[in-house]
């Protein structure tokens, strides 16, 4: 059978209307519009950290926050692109650069604190990070899961893992607006560690969340 004849036969046999997927950039705008108010609401409910004005004047802290936000935005965009047939594969790896910048700035902060004295490398327990990130990332994660569920499951592990990274990185961005824990080794272990854990869990859930849906005739 000719390709054109096969396409016509398949199209003629469609029993439900087919809706074109929204462009990834539109999905990103919708995701941010749903996520940003929730993050702002949680931050205001928890209360802005009293030294926020001082932190905003620190280039290192601002770079870390900007990098975390860029990780969230690029990971969300990459996750949405991964669910559209025909998109180039390099789009899925765009978040790597801001992720390296984020980890690099935190690593540089660790070195600076180590030069200032051994006290900066003391690791203490900070169990508030994981539940805080989960709480802030609840709406962004749910919104991303719903959006990915409606897209083609071309790379379920990668796309859902990227979606989880986007929600967790955005949550960490919001967490640092009220959580006064800036020792870089603590941030890497507890906050970035929480982001990595949630990303891994999301990737494992990918095949269950995003899969081909088969319709049956009544």
Image (tube, rainbow, N blue to C red):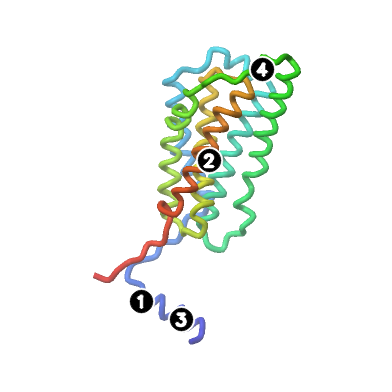
Check disc 3 and report the residue beneath it.
6
Farthest left residue in view: 218
Tell me the distance, in whole angstroms, between the alpha carbons under discs 1 and 2: 39 Å
Which of disc 4 and disc 1 is earlier in sequence? 1
Residue at the image point whose x is 66% and y is 28% from the top: 106
Tell me the distance, in whole angstroms, between the alpha carbons under discs 1 and 4: 67 Å
Check disc 2 and report the residue beneath it.
166
Tell me the distance, in whole angstroms, between the alpha carbons under discs 4 and 2: 29 Å
Tell me the distance, in whole angstroms, between the alpha carbons under discs 3 and 4: 66 Å
Question: 213 or 186, which lies in front?
Answer: 186
Which of disc 2 and disc 1 is earlier in sequence? 1
Residue at the image point whose x is 60% and y is 52% from the top: 92
Decide: is 159 above or below 61: below
* Residue 120: numbered disc: 4
Question: 211 or 52, which lies in front?
Answer: 211
Q: Horizontally, is 86 left or right of 140 in the view?
A: right
Tell me the distance, in whole angstroms, between the alpha carbons under discs 3 and 2: 39 Å
Check disc 1 and report the residue beneath it.
13
Tell me the distance, in whole angstroms, between the alpha carbons under discs 1 and 3: 11 Å
| Residue 112, percent from left and from top | 73, 21
Residue at the image point whose x is 46% and y is 17% from the top: 47
| Residue 127, percent from left and from top | 48, 23
């Amino acid at each position: 059978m000719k390709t054109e004849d096969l396409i016509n036969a398949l199209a003629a046999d469609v029993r439900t209307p087919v809706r074109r997927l929204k462009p990834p950039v539109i999905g990103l705008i919708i995701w941010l519009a749903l996520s940003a108010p929730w993050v702002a609401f949680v931050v205001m409910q928890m209360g802005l950290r009293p030294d926020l004005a001082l932190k905003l004047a620190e280039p290192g802290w601002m770079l870390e926050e900007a990098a975390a936000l860029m990780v969230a935005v690029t990971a969300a965009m990459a996750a949405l692109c991964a669910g559209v047939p025909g998109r180039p594969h390099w789009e899925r790896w765009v978040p790597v650069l801001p992720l390296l910048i984020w980890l690099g700035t935190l690593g540089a902060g660790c070195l600076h604190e180590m030069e200032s004295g051994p006290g900066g490398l003391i690791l203490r327990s900070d169990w508030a990070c994981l539940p805080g990130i989960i709480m802030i990332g609840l709406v962004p994660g749910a919104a991303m899961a719903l959006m990915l569920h409606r897209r083609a499951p071309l790379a379920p592990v990668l796309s859902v893992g990227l979606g989880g990274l986007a929600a967790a990185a955005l949550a960490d961005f919001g967490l640092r607006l009220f959580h006064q824990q800036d020792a870089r080794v603590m941030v890497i272990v507890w906050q970035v560690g929480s982001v990595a854990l949630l990303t891994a869990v999301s990737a494992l859930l990918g095949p269950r969340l995003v899969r081909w849906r088969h319709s049956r005739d009544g």
